[in-house]
């Protein structure tokens, strides 16, 4: 059997929406489908203001512009992270101060954040890893007491919750991804969420190349021109049309993913019961959006053997995130603190194949091979 790691999923409505967008004569950005997507997100998740972007990376770069991140500002972010999470702020000249992960969860260690804050700290950028919520009460409390901002990198967190609040609705700003490896996809694509009123007006200008074009089309100004910095962050209507088809099916997509996640979890608990490996932990304040499923092996050597074994059986399991504080680009700029949990997750995580139409037969095959690996090892 050959089981890929990921397969893009189509709800069935994408082609119709793409045709409709193409036939409408408006395929550049900020048209009918963009508005439909915007309305969907604000209505369903209570986000104050949203703007589709061409990627989560772009949304994070918009966040850096909105926060006016400058040379010598400091940004706190987890080391166990995707490159863009840090790079978006580094691009503006910020120093990245890396925090460790929690011991039993790849998310940022909220208890250590306060020790990293200085008079130069501008923002805390957090990732809800695998759609599992960070400890947002703690993080928002620290940010409010120090008068700094919180950006949620919610790339993996669509339809995730912290207590009863949608992830992406809590920080001052948030960024989502619709890259083809996420729950809801448009090939490449993203979303910036603006929850703080102070950033709303400027966000549209930055989105539209530094012009007040959006206000012009609403009839609020009689001509538009260059009013601030910006770039071309908005996606074409073709991307929005594709995305909207996915959003219309979000509930059934999420049902499918939760079933897959629960199946893996139920069938693999023996690993934890027998002390052979660890499964994802979901704190009681977090929902589960079933973005990914991982097994935490006991060592790098075991992980290497495990991945090789699975790959030899046609199962495309993978690992990810080399800790950014040890990356070739940032290593020499890091202040030298050791971040053992980030290193542990980097060395020990194995992500199992996870896509909406994976079959029970395929899942059973994977589970069977995992069982075989851990039986052989005894
Ligand atoms: C996927 C991902 C990104 C990047 O998303 P793009 O849309 O590809 O730019 C950023 N951060 C995290 C945590 C991600 O998982």
Image (cartoon, rainbow, N blue to C red):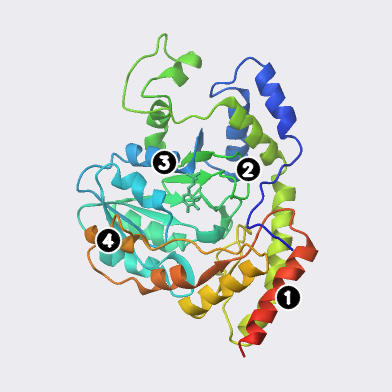
* Quadrant where the N terminus is found in the figure: bottom right
- Which of these two is toward me, 42 or 237? 237
Question: Looking at the picture, does residue 271 appear above or below residue 328?
Answer: below
- Which of these two is toward me, 288 or 29? 29
Residue shown at 51%/73% (left/top)?
304
Q: Residue furthest front?
A: 312
Q: Residue 193, how many percent across, how many down? A: 48, 41
Q: Helix, strand, or loop for circle 1? A: helix
Q: Residue 228, how many percent across, how many down? A: 31, 25
Q: Quadrant of residue 340?
A: bottom left
| Mark 2 → mark 4, Cα distance in angstroms | 41 Å
Q: Helix, strand, or loop for circle 2? A: helix
Task: Say whether residue 67 is left or right of residue 203.
Answer: left
**Which disc number belongs to residue 196?**
3
**Which disc number belongs to residue 331?**
4
Badge 3: residue crowd in 10 Å (few <14, some 14–19, many ≥20)? some
Q: Quadrant of residue 204?
A: top left
**Which disc number belongs to residue 204?**
none
Q: Residue furthest top?
A: 222
Identify the residue position indicated by label 1 in the image: 368
Q: Nearer the viewer, mark 1 or mark 2?
A: 1
Q: Which of the two discs, 4 and 1, labels the residue nearer the N terminus?
A: 4
Question: Looking at the picture, does residue 66 appear above or below residue 126?
Answer: above
Identify the residue position indicated by label 2 in the image: 44
Badge 1: residue crowd in 10 Å (few <14, some 14–19, many ≥20)? few
Q: Helix, strand, or loop for circle 3? A: loop
| Mark 4 → mark 3, Cα distance in angstroms | 34 Å
Badge 4: residue crowd in 10 Å (few <14, some 14–19, many ≥20)? few
Q: Which of the two discs, 2 and 4, labels the residue nearer the N terminus?
A: 2
């Amino acid at each position: 059997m050959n089981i890929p790691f990921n397969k893009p999923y189509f709800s069935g409505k994408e082609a119709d929406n793409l045709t409709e967008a193409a036939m409408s004569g408006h395929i550049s950005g900020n048209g009918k489908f963009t508005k439909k997507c915007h309305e969907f997100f604000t209505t369903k998740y209570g986000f104050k203001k949203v703007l589709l972007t061409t990627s989560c990376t772009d949304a994070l770069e918009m966040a850096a512009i909105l926060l006016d991140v400058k040379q010598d500002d400091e940004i706190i972010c987890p080391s166990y992270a995707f490159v863009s999470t840090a790079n978006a702020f580094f691009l503006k000249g910020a120093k990245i101060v890396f925090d460790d992960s929690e011991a039993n969860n790849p998310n940022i260690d909220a208890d250590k954040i306060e020790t990293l804050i200085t008079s130069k700290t501008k923002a805390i950028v957090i990732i809800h890893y695998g759609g599992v919520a960070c400890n947002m009460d703690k993080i928002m409390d620290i940010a409010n007491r120090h008068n700094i901002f919180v950006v949620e990198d919610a790339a993996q967190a669509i339809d995730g919750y912290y207590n009863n609040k949608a992830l992406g609705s809590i920080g001052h700003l948030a960024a989502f991804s619709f890259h083809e490896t996420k729950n809801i996809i448009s090939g490449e694509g993203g979303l910036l969420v603006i929850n703080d009123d102070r950033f709303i007006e400027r966000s549209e200008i930055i989105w539209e190349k530094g012009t007040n074009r959006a206000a012009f089309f609403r009839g609020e100004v009689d001509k538009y021109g260059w009013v601030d910095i910006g770039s071309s962050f908005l996606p074409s209507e073709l991307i929005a049309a594709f995305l909207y088809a996915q959003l219309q099916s979000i509930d059934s997509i999420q049902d499918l993913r939760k079933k897959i996640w629960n199946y893996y979890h139920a069938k693999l608990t023996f690993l934890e019961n027998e002390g052979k490996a660890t499964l994802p932990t979901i704190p009681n304040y977090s929902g589960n959006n079933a973005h990914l499923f991982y097994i935490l092996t006991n060592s790098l050597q075991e992980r290497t053997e495990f991945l090789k074994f699975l790959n030899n059986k046609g199962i495309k399991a993978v690992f990810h995130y080399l800790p950014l504080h040890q990356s070739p680009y940032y290593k020499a700029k890091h202040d030298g603190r050791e971040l053992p949990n980030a290193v542990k997750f980097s060395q020990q995580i194995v992500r199992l194949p996870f896509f909406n139409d994976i079959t029970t037969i395929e899942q059973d095959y994977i589970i069977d091979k995992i069982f075989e690996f851990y039986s052989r090892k005894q």
